[in-house]
Image: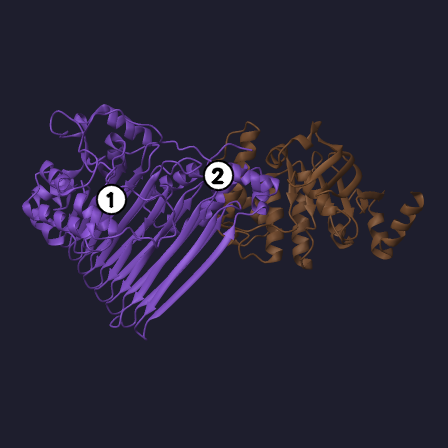
Amino acid sequence: MFKIENLHAGVEGREILKGVNLEINAGEVHAIMGPNGSGKSTLGHIIAGREGYDVSQGAMEFKGKDLLDLGPEERAHLGIFLAFQYPVEIPGVNTTYFLKSAVNEVRKARGLPELDAVEFLKYIKEKAALLQLPGDFLKRALNVGFSGGEKKRNEIFQMAVLEPCFAVLDETDSGLDIDALKVVSNGVNQVKSPDRAQLVITHYQRLLDYIVPDFVHVLYDGRIIRSGGKELALELEERGYDWVIESASVEA
Amino acid sequence: MSEATETIEGFVKSDYKYGFVTDIETDSAPPGLSEDIIRFISEKKEEPEFLLQWRLKAYEYWKKMECPGWPMVQYPPVDFQEIIYYAAPKDPSEGPKSLDEVDPKLLETYDKLGVPLHERARLAGVAVDAVFDSVSVGTTYQETLAEHGVIFCSFSEAVQSHPDLIQQYLGTVVPYTDNFYAALNSAVFSDGSFVYIPKGVRCPMELSTYFRINAAKSGQFERTLIVAEDSAYVSYLEGCTAPMRDENQLHAAVVELVALDQAEIKYSTVQNWYPGDEEGRGGIYNFVTKRGLCRGRRSKISWTQVETGSAITWKYPSCVLQGDESVGEFYSVALTNNRQQADTGTKMIHSGKNTRSTIISKGISAGRGQNSYRGLVQIRKNAANARNFSQCDSLLIGDQCGAHTFPYVEVKNTSSKVEHEATTSKIGEDQIFYCNQRGIETQDAVNMIVNGFCKEVFRELPMEFAMEAQKLLDVSLEGSVG
């Protein structure tokens, strides 16, 4: 479904990703872990198509399409979603209006009829219940005055509404207390299906207790230096990253 | 400059959609200004002697004045002898009696502009007094209004039919001595609208006027006067678009509002004069004096403006709160793109006791636009317990534009309370990327963010007008992608 080959990318001449390889099939959940500054968030941004990065080498494809040629909104139309580490605020634009525009843009791009206000409201109310969102949430300006936890919850809510084929969750667990973490994870798990895939970027094994990955990768200095099953996350939690880094440098 | 900033800038480049010229013969005065020209205008309009004398006094006063240099706008000096001060569409039968008699070409022009005249006006329930160049060409719903005793007609008509009211109120809010452009307007004004709401009447519909500059080199000098007697209410809408021109056109209007005891006047403007091209060539100079006098106790005047056009905008719709407990409001959205310059704001003059005023100003700067808010809150000695709240927000799009705020506060009464809040923000690459990632294209994202920013002002506009304003803002920010 999603494949990255030998991806090199950076900002202003500084290389951040130095040859990333990753293949994700439908139905799979992958986790990317790694110390600060290893390039995790950059990877998320590049998948979503953020401008400002120079991709110098490599390929990235989704459902057989070359992603590197597409703008961020085109990737979104194909079903790629990024849950932001730092969701932005848009004053004066309420969450419902924002999401209705988003859903209808995606539908338009796929040749589907746009949802009218009544249909849409019914649809998002069901989704809001799933994330246990308070009643006024949908009427408030997008992320304005939201707590850190509310913003993250809003990201997962948007994911539930947009039903992407491939979702990248960038440190969705940071800033969440344990109850919020459960609600968010529950939301993520409900979106899971055999024809969808997820890439979870996180620092902590804690999240992976709730969102159980099929594969865990360690990203260090712009490369994936180790991949394994979910037990790798537990091992990292126990032993830290040093041993992985050391063994990787020995191999190199 | 990063790529994303360039992209954002790509979106604010736009072509003026209303750039077309209607081919109609005009009956014009020669260019230039003199006593003879003023007599010509007055004679053309068959005006009573008092009005001619008033014009001439204004002209004498104006000759001694100098063009103001304090606004934060730059433009080459205007040659007042180059301007044509009177231009009327030539029509054989002394002007149309009804819309059916209106030159179809003219209606077509309005059609292109989306003016809800004719059937659309009926459907929308709006009475339209359309000003084409200097002469009013169509008025609807006059009969319904007449039943309520409401007078809504062109200024020229009012001079003929209600000279007493004109003489009583003309210049009482904006005297010809007020400022350079008000004096000029007083001397040469050609037409405009007159509204009179009698005692106790709530005007049964929104009154609407669309202005349009058409003839080449014709400066347009409208004069609008609205009088609401005791406990009367009226909501008045003014909208403008102008076709493309190479030369700058001067637009110096005067609007006077008078609210007596417990009367309320709501005045809404959507201004979309031609802003000039990307390099600032052409475009309208919009130098307007708008002022409302809350003369009566508990009277209220509310200004709402959406300013997206003109090369230069220079206007300060103001309220003089003379009556005790009177209320003044000013809600403004001003957008400057490309080389547009705007110096706009309001004056709230509190002289009555327990008077209140609210100022909400939203300035949007894009391209190389310069946007200034200039506002005066003056609390006079006798204005016990006067209150003001001001909020001035600026939004920047791209990194070559400017936003400026000049709040003046003069307080001479210790029991009053004045608050001022101001913010400046920039449409960030983060916000754009966030919207893109959800499937929303950059242009739609910019529009959405700008509309969100303006929400507090848009909700003060009548419903249809709010939608039109939103559309105008979108058009003004439109451009080719990438």
Chain holding disc 1: B
Query: Could one spot residue B139 in this view of the protein?
Result: no
Q: Residues within 10 Å of mark 1 (few under 14, many from 20)?
A: some
**In the rendered picture, chain A carries what hue?**
brown
**Is residue B146 placed above or below A207 in the rendered structure?**
above
A137 or B378: nearer the viewer: B378
The chain painted purple is B
Q: Earlier in the sequence, mark 2 or mark 1?
A: 2
Question: Looking at the image, which residue is at 71% across and 41% down?
Answer: A198
User: For mark 1, what is the residue?
Assistant: B206
In the displayed structure image, the side of residue A46 where residue B361 appears, left or right = left
Quadrant holding the N terminus of chain B: top right
B369 or A209: nearer the viewer: B369
User: For mark 2, what is the residue?
Assistant: B12
Question: Looking at the image, which residue is at 86% across and 52% down?
Answer: A235
Chain holding disc 2: B
In the displayed structure image, the side of residue B164 where residue B423 appears, left or right = right
Residue B414 in the image: state x and y as whole percent: 32, 75
Helix, strand or loop under label 2 = helix
